Amino acid sequence: MSREMGWKEDVEVSLTVTGLFRVGSGRGGLEVDLPATRDPSNLSSSLRGVLRKSVRRMIHSANLSSLAGCEEKIFGSWVASEGSQPAEGKLRVASLSSEREKSRRQRRTGIRIDGVFGSVAHGALFTYEASEGERGSLTLKFKLGFNYPLDDEEAASLLAGLNGLLYDSIGSFASRGLGIVEKVDIDQKFQQYANQTLAKCFLGR
């Protein structure tokens, strides 16, 4: 792809998640307090959120100051500045068919802790659902699409964020060790394209 045109092709990404994995339905249930959902839009939203945090973290922790500002261009702005409108981001995330649809559902019990006193909260006991793969891990597949082409710096920022997902967590209950990402597979063509700029950013620190 010509670098003058930027990157506009879809990028396929797969995450291997170890142990239990959970994306909540956003509502309580009758048989379980916190049911899980297999709605692909919820999973896409979860990846978008954790990927945005990873891009921000990598830019600051890896001292990639030349990439500052790329996060908002990729993901859009949450809050409009005075006299302006929220900006639409370039990134679209779609969940593809994955092992999660064939995974076993587990029901677990949790205990709520009072954030003020650090003790067991009133009515503390609750139940929640989570998924588990046949071999103790799940593969989640996504397609990243773009409303407008990414420039070189934006592509480098996105690649850094994707690499930064390793050993991060996706889904809810990360504090309980759910959804730990043990492997990240990224479209090779995109890696080769974005690595050129990313390597220059590291060398230019």
Image (tube, helix red, strand yellow):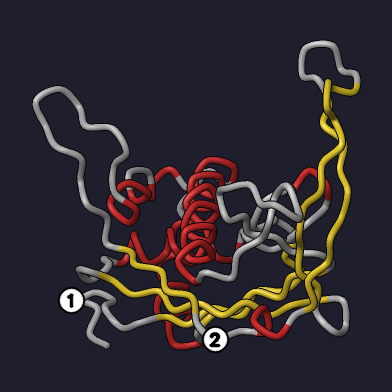
Marks 2 and 1 close (CB-CB < 8 Å) = no
Residue 4 image label: 1
Q: Which mark is residue 169?
A: none
SS assignment at label 2 = loop
Percent x, y of residue 48: 47, 58
Q: Position of residue 42 (x, y in %)?
A: 50, 61
**Label drawn at residue 97:** 2
Give the vertical position of 18 relative to 115 (above or below). below
Q: Residue shown at 34%/53% (left/top)? A: 75
Instruction: Give percent across and percent down for residue 52.
Output: 47, 51
Q: Residue at x 61, y 84 (%)?
A: 98
Label 2 amino acid? Ser
Check disc 1: other Cα within 10 Å, few if <14, some if 14-19, many if 20+.
few
Q: Residue furthest top?
A: 117
The answer to which image quadrant residue 130 occupies is bottom right
Residue ID at (44%, 63%) = 158
The quarter of the rendered structure image containing the N terminus is: bottom left
Amino acid type at mark 1:
Glu
Q: Nearer the viewer, residue 71 or 51?
A: 51
In the displayed structure, does residue 67 sit left or right of residue 181? left
Give the Cα distance between marks 2 and 1. Answer: 33 Å
